Amino acid sequence: MKRVITCFCVLLTALSLVACSKEAPVQQPEPTAVVQTTPELSTNLPDNVTPDEINTEKQTTVLIAYFSCTGTTEKIAQYAADILGADIYEIIPETPYTQEDLNYNNSSSRANQEQSDSSARPAISGSVENMENYDTVLLGYPIWHGKAPRIISTFLESYDFSEKTIVPVCTSHSSGIGSSDTNLHSLCPDTVTWKPGERFPAGASKESIQKWIDTLNLSPENTVGSFNFETKTVLLNSGYEMSILGLGTYSLSDEECESSVSALLEAGGRLIDTAYIYHNEAAVGKAVRESGVPRDEVFVTTKLYPNQFANAAEAIDESLERMGFEYIDLMLLHHPGENDVQAYKAMEQAVADGKIRSIGLSNWYVEELTEFLPQVSITPALVQNEIHPYYQENDVIPYIQDLGIVVQGWYPLGGRGHTGELLGDETISGIAAAHGVSSAQVILRWNLQKGVVVIPGSSNPDHIRENLDLFGFSLTEEEMAKMNALDRGEKHDWY
């Protein structure tokens, strides 16, 4: 999830010392400290539940902390936060810098005096909440006289960075990074891991930031919602990891379902999607239990149908009983309906009781989410909607992802009655031929590169294995653009 942590105190004016003082001062408001966030993770619980009662793993995240005078470093920080899906915090001085303070040519200016005094520690307005939750900190700052501004020293000495990784990233119009990053090492405990810093000029592109971040080998699993293509998993905002590809069981009979789930597990797949209305929960449970694969390695999603919403607590217990499980990895509301908020609250209570690990929604779009989310306590971990090349939801997907919610696509291959046309699309088959893969693999890989989890349905073991084989190739930007151009807004089911 990308949260924005900012202190609305001053709007810093002026230039960095490298750029001197060519702009007029800007009126600065009185400093205050306010923290803003986008919708939070699963921190608001039912009144009778404490956070300690929720059985989840610790979330590990990346923080972008930066100090900026001219907006140059701010822009780089925003790019990094977008790329990593990271939280962002602006380091704002308690006493704002005026243009005269930043006058490069005046040896008596405040900033020049601070840079000449290694003990100077300008005070910071506001602070980072829950610094202990961050494993990696990207530290952004402008170059002043070949050094990091002294307010960076204040920041580093204000928190315990033990066992964390710090990555300096600086900006300047002409100066290189020099020793500005290594000079900071002595301000932190020896247990800090420092990665080599990088300097970017004004006007650096987002693509150049992306290339640099790609070299850092920051673990994608540390960021909620980011796909890890090595482990083939994504970290949900509930703290649990889920496979990014698996098997949908819609319309599979009990015998077909059991055989298909067994084939998936034998092929290494670990994500299975079922629902009460599919009438095959028992078959899914039986296949998982008899597979020999440890239960905690398999991620099973099921759903409550609207005719269960009025008695959701009982329906949850019945689902557990049918599958023969002690817990459900993820439970969704199948689509909006009467008593859906009441049913979601029952799932929230089931999370507190240890019956469900993660909860979410299916067939909720922007309008429905805007109305629904303020009425519940736990942010959905996942929203599952129809998504395929002819119905792409390019406005809905980023909206959901920006809330820190993972997106999953059902009917990724178009759905029954439409799969043949989609797989025969000349654009798709042409891309497939170029990579020596099938059209189905191209479609599924396209989804993954858009950050959409896929659950194609199949009862054919060969197709199930093929649908898992998506990591020996990748689509180019040009190929992704061609796929994106296929959108018709053509929905294949009524949900």
Image (spheres, rainbow, N blue to C red):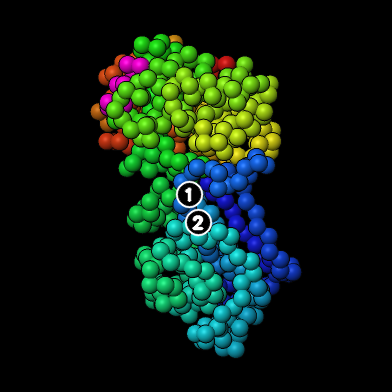
Looking at the image, is 76 positioned above or below residue 297?
A: below
Disc 1 is placed on an element classified as loop
Q: Quadrant of residue 283?
A: top left
Task: Give percent across and percent down for residue 491.
Answer: 53, 19
Badge 1 amino acid? Gln
User: Which mark is on residue 133?
Assistant: 2
Task: Give percent across and percent down for residue 480.
Answer: 41, 35
Task: Give percent across and percent down for residue 348.
Answer: 60, 35
Left or right placement of residue 60 versus residue 40 in this view: left
Residue at screen point 60% across, 46% down: 50
Instruction: First in sequence, mark 2 or 1: give its number.
Output: 1
- Whether residues under marks 2 and 1 lie with C-beta atoms below 8 angstroms apart, the answer is yes
Residue 111 seen from this side: yes
Say which of 450 and 384 sits in front.
384
Residue lying furthest left: 436
Residue at screen point 69% across, 33% down: 371
Which range is magenta? 258-267
**Residue 19 in magenta?**
no
Badge 2 amino acid? Asn
Residue at screen point 56% across, 29% down: 361
**Residue 262 in magenta?**
yes
Q: Main secondary structure of the magenta part?
A: helix
Q: In which quarter of the image is residue 273?
A: top left
The residue wearing badge 1 is 59
